[in-house]
Image (tube, grey):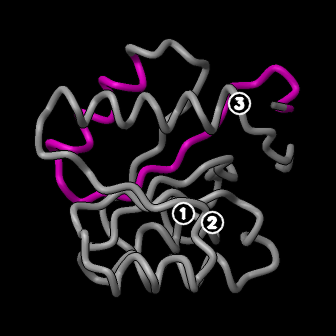
Amino acid sequence: MRTNGRPIRILLVEDNPGDIELTKVALEENKLNNNLHVVMDGEEASDYLYRRGNYTDAPRPDLILLDLNLPRKDGRQVLEEIKSDPDLSDIPVVILTTSAADEDILRAYQLHVNCYVRKPLDLDQFVKVVQSIESFWLSIVELPDRE
């Protein structure tokens, strides 16, 4: 993983405060060097990625954890926006959602999601899933080093 010694920047796009808190706890417990940024809907995600409004100084994320069912603009639209933009398309996107619908899974992969993970309902399993995502994407995978 090449990050020039800086922490990995993770953008979490999630509207559920409980899932946000669990994700934070899981990432802290894993003790990998990361900076977590959270936005709570699809419009905020777009503003963050395009550095608009309150996010003019937002750092480019190295990894995006994206829920599908979001207010204002859903995760499917955000994913399509990211993967169709040459300046953003190389950012890995992990769908982290409760949806097990075949059409959601198929559509996400058609839009070039990097992986699709269903949120477990069990709290301990949720923490383990987030830690597995973090370990895989931040310890095993080589990410591009782009600012």
Q: Which residue is mark 1?
A: 48
- Judged by depth in the image, the label closer to the viewer, 1 or 3, is 3
Q: What is the C-alpha distance between the residues marked 1 and 2?
A: 5 Å
Q: Quadrant of the N terminus?
A: top right
Q: Is residue 39 left or right of residue 65?
A: left
Q: Amino acid at mark 1?
A: Tyr
CA gap, disc 1 and disc 3? 27 Å
34 left or right of 73 in image: right
Residue drawn at (61%, 19%) of the image: 33
Q: Against 68, is 56 above or below?
A: above
**What amino acid does circle 3 point to?**
Ile
Residue 91 image offset from top left, x and y in percent: 70, 59
Callout 3: SS: helix
* Residue 72 belongs to the span the image colors magenta: no
Residue 4 magenta-highlighted: yes
Residue of label 3 = 140
The residue tagged 2 is 51
Callout 1: 10 Å neighbours few (<14), some, many (20+)?
many
Specify the label residue 33 is tagged with: none
Where in the figure is residue 96, as x and y percent of width and height? Answer: 37, 56
Q: Nearer the viewer, residue 146 or 104?
A: 104
Mark 3 vs 2, N-terminal side: 2
The amino acid type, in three-letter code, at marker 2 is: Arg
Quadrant assignment, res 122 = top left
Q: Is residue 73 left or right of residue 82?
A: left
Residue 21 rendering spot, x and y as whole percentages: 23, 34
Do callouts 1 and 2 mark residues in contact (Cβ within 8 Å)? yes
Q: Is 11 above or below relative to 115?
A: above
In x, y percent, where is residue 141? 73, 38
